[in-house]
Image (spheres, helix red, strand yellow):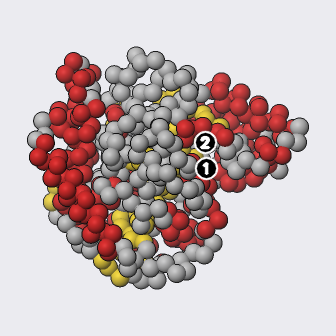
Amino acid sequence: MSAPDLLMQDACTIATALRSRQVSATMLVEASLARIGHTDPLINAFTAITHQRARARAEQIDQQLATGNASTSALPLLGVPFAVKNLFDIEGITTLAGSTILAGEPVAKVDGPLVSRLEAAGAILVGALNMDEFAYGFSTENSHYGPTRNPHDPARLAGGSSGGSAAAVAAGQVPLTLGSDTNGSIRVPASLCGIYGLKPTYGRLPRTGTYPFVNSLDHLGPFARSVRDLALSYDVLQGYDANDSGCVRRYVEPCSGTLEPGLKGLRIARLGGYFQEHSEATARHAVDRVAQALGGLATLELPEVPRARAAAFVITNAEGAALHLNDLRSRAGDFEPLSRDRFLAGALLPAAWVIQAQRVRRWFALRVAELMRDVDVLIAAATPVPAPLIGTEWIEIGGRKVQARPSLGLLTQPISCIGLPVCCVPVWDAHPALPIGVQIIAAPWREDHALRVACALERAGVTRAPVAQLS
């Protein structure tokens, strides 16, 4: 198989081919760089491409393999090209976080820990990816760097705020990327771009070496075109980091070896009520398809979901605004208008509202924990609709028109608010031409449960993540 053809496969297949010397790391990197060069003028996923670094690392790997270096050959992500959302620190590059305000800051002196962990596993960094400014949005319609376009229909949104991360995988530019999720920023673009995404439990992966948005809600996680890639990359990324106060000191708990049992022993239910009422026909059909494949599921309702989403909004606005208060005072005109207005609103929130939002969040977490004593996994749509057209201001949900951009997170925000692990899986037979995602939600620290269900659905052919057919 040629390097360009191999690039269309998943990361595990790529690493196996390189290990058996069917292809070289240099050939893979050149194929990735060529694919980016050919497709990114249309998709606009990348804000920086690390040509020199990627080629040097590929040459180093090839030299080590040529000498029979057993430790290099055993690396789990050997030679796999990857890229990261541009809020991750990359040595020698300024961390933009989708803004121009940070463009004049010094370059990062070292890579962020998660970038280093992927490279230590053999992966090769090829660049940084577009996003909503300061991760505040669900569309990646970035007015500074241009919108990222959905590879399956470039007239449509890629989702956000990790839109570049999802689009790069869907476009076949790289098989693996990293993004962040505060209120749905991994799951929304994974849903709209038709790929797999994982938001681990809050505190599982360190945020050190990334530009923050909302400390009490920020998660980091991978995107991939297969569940086994998602599990393998998650295994590589795990590990405590004392430099992140939110990172929990917990043993590494690998998931790659736990996928085989499938659904055996798992208690699974679907979420009704709010989650069904705020899903349009395509999203409901996708959940029906998944539920049918899982053997038909009982329906449960979470209590007071609208209040949980409102709490997430208040906390996001208040914490986000506090981080940017000095710049809001001195250079408000340098922000994107949409993010600036949201931050300004957050700066004006009464403290009593923020305190009450945290109380609601705690109450909701306790009620969901009680419910999950009797169930291991919950499923719900990831977005209420498939990808809207770029520039769409309003969408219809439940018979009424709502603002498009914030409403893409209707179904993800309540889950983010309490930090549960979620795997987003892509369903393709719910719409004639577009994918839509389904959330597989597990109890805290049970990413293995979510990934087991995701793997069973993938093997059954219910979910898949094909590379977009770009002209």
Residue 89 sits above or below residue 261 on the image: above
Where residue 253 sits in the image (x, y, percent)? 57, 59
Pick the front one: 432 or 245? 245
Residue 328 sits above or below residue 6 on the image: above
Where residue 240 sits in the image (x, y, percent)? 53, 47
Residue drawn at x 39%, y 70% as measured from the top left: 379
Hey, what amino acid is under mark 2? Arg
Task: Give the image quarter of residue 173.
Answer: top right
Mark 1 highlights which residue?
A: 236
Mark 2 highlights which residue?
A: 117
Where residue 432 sits in the image (x, y, percent)? 42, 63
Pick the front one: 164 or 240? 240
Is residue 190 visible in the rendered structure shown here? no
Pick the front one: 207 or 81? 207
Residue drawn at x 65%, y 24% as measured from the top left: 52
Q: Is residue 144 left or right of residue 231?
A: left
